[in-house]
Amino acid sequence: MFLDKLQANVSEQYPLLLANCRVFLDFDNTMTISDVLSDLILDHSIDKDWIELEDLWRRGRIGARECLRGQLKKVRIGKKDFDQFLSEVKLDEGIFELLSFLDQKGIKPVVLSDNFLPVVDRILDHHGIRDIKIYANGLRSFGDRLIPSFPYYNPQCPSCAHCKKTHVVSDRADEGPVIYIGDGRSDFCPANASDLVFAKDTLAEYLEQKESDFLRYENLKEVADYFKNWMYFI
């Protein structure tokens, strides 16, 4: 069904992409089947103050960095519970097919996340996904508290905690096409800097409003099928 829709709707610029393309993936609700960071805050916050911060962020009143800092201040989770939480996170099953196909073609994807590096790394490692480049926010534990840091914050992009666009732009040295796969608000900037975007949920709505070209997907199996059936690697 997905490929039938592509055949009817994809513009002429998409069917041919070269082997030196760059592939970037969001993590939460893209590689995973849920928003891991939101689940963590929802399940382990000591009060409901995070809701107001979330609302302010969605309305553009505060940036993602301020929002995350405020929300994590109220999270309490010990190491044992944290490890258990991370071990229960489920991935989109299509990620394994997609990564396998990219590996066969010599393409090394990069994960760009507004989550935190120890979280992303441990979840992927738990599922046997290793040796993949990850750019994410920093995190350290102090007792039952989580203390964030934001090494990729860009003052010129104050709405983002992690300026994902920086990595997309800096990784264009070979001038191959950039492919981005995402779902949410933190993906707006990198999507705008990419040549081909796979989008769902909030990102898809945003690109529709902008009347920007993108390919809608529901799961990563659909993305893997697109790579296998529509792209030529030379």
Image: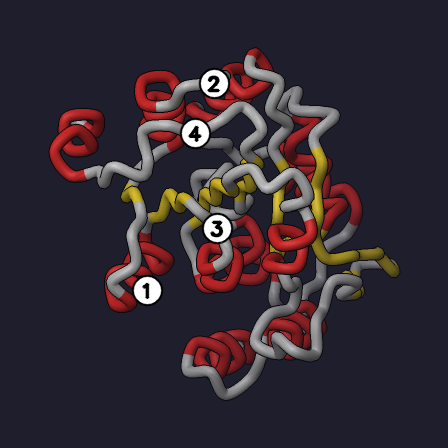
Q: Which is more N-terminal, label 1 or label 4?
A: 4
Q: Is residue 14 left or right of residue 82?
A: left
Which residue type carries mark 1?
Answer: Tyr
- Can residue 93 be seen here? The reply is yes
Which residue type carries mark 2?
Answer: Phe
Other-residue count near label 2 (Cα within 10 Å), few / some / many at <14 / 14–19 / ≥20 = few
Which residue type carries mark 3?
Answer: Ser
Tell me which residue sits at (31%, 18%) in the image.
229
Where is the N terminus found, in terms of image quarters?
A: top left
Q: Is residue 82 left or right of residue 234?
A: right
Q: Which is more N-terminal, label 1 or label 2?
A: 1
Asked if the residues shown at circle 4 and circle 2 are in contact, with their CB atoms under 8 angstroms apart, the answer is yes
Q: Which residue is mark 3?
A: 194
Question: In front: mark 4 or mark 3?
Answer: 4
Q: Which is more N-terminal, label 3 or label 1?
A: 3
How far, Cα to Cα, is label 4 from label 2? 7 Å
Other-residue count near label 1 (Cα within 10 Å), few / some / many at <14 / 14–19 / ≥20 = some
Q: Which residue is mark 1?
A: 206
- Can residue 46 be seen here? The reply is no
Q: Position of residue 198 (x, y in %)?
A: 37, 43
Tell me: residue 163, above or below residue 183.
below
Q: Which is more N-terminal, label 2 or label 3?
A: 3
How far, Cα to Cα, is label 4 from label 3? 13 Å
